[in-house]
Image: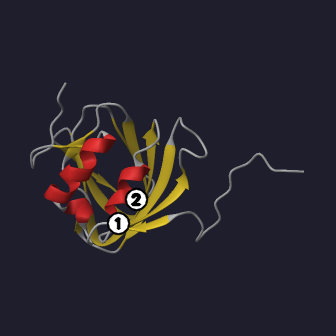
Amino acid sequence: MTSRAHVVQPAQGRSVDLGVARMRVLADSTVSAAFSLTEFAGTAEGAWTVPHLHRGFEESFFVLDGEFTFTVGGEAIVAGPGTYVLVGRDTAHTITAGPGGGRFLTLMVPGGLEEMFIELGELPPNAITDPVARKAVSARYDSIPTTARPWTSR
């Protein structure tokens, strides 16, 4: 009998080195067009992304380890293990890791943004935090760089 479950065991799943963090794909468009689920983990302190927003999807985060500051629409949200943060469409946001980095899950609805991170992983280290590299890749994935201070466009 064939299982209908999609299972990703520890240390399985496509993994992409983004310099400041590593992304592991848990569910992508081959599993569901409705969403993507990834895990980001790293030991780097500081910015893990550039300020950006998404017009066509929502992104949410669940912190597993460490402490992160999610700046969402201009509001700094300090998030430790067990904290869930939902970022709505058209809302600028950034992610900054505290000392020692950490680990969080990212749910993207609808799915597909994981492809941008895979492409960024093929560029020089830390392209995810390089505004020039990020802008070139992001345009194809509804990840729109914003000014240094996130705000909401609503």
Q: Is residue 143 left or right of residue 41?
A: left
Give whichever of 122, 142 is nearer the camera: 122
Residue at left offset 20%, top offset 58%: 133
Q: Quadrant of the C terminus?
A: top left
Q: Is residue 144 above or below residue 115?
A: above
**Residue occupying the point 28% across, 73% down:** 44
Q: Is residue 143 visible?
A: no
Task: Read off the residue under disc 2.
Answer: 118
Residue extending furthest toward the top:
154
Residue 151 lies left or right of residue 64; in this view the side is left
Check disc 2: other Cα within 10 Å, few if <14, some if 14-19, many if 20+: some
| Mark 2 residue element | helix
Amino acid type assigned to the residue bearing label 1 in the image: Glu
Seen at 26% across and 60% down, the residue is: 128
Asked if the residues shown at circle 1 and circle 2 are in contact, with their CB atoms under 8 angstroms apart, the answer is: yes
Looking at the image, is 10 positioned above or below residue 49? below
Going by the image, does 135 lie left or right of 148?
Answer: right
Q: Is residue 55 visible?
A: yes
Residue occupied by mark 1: 122
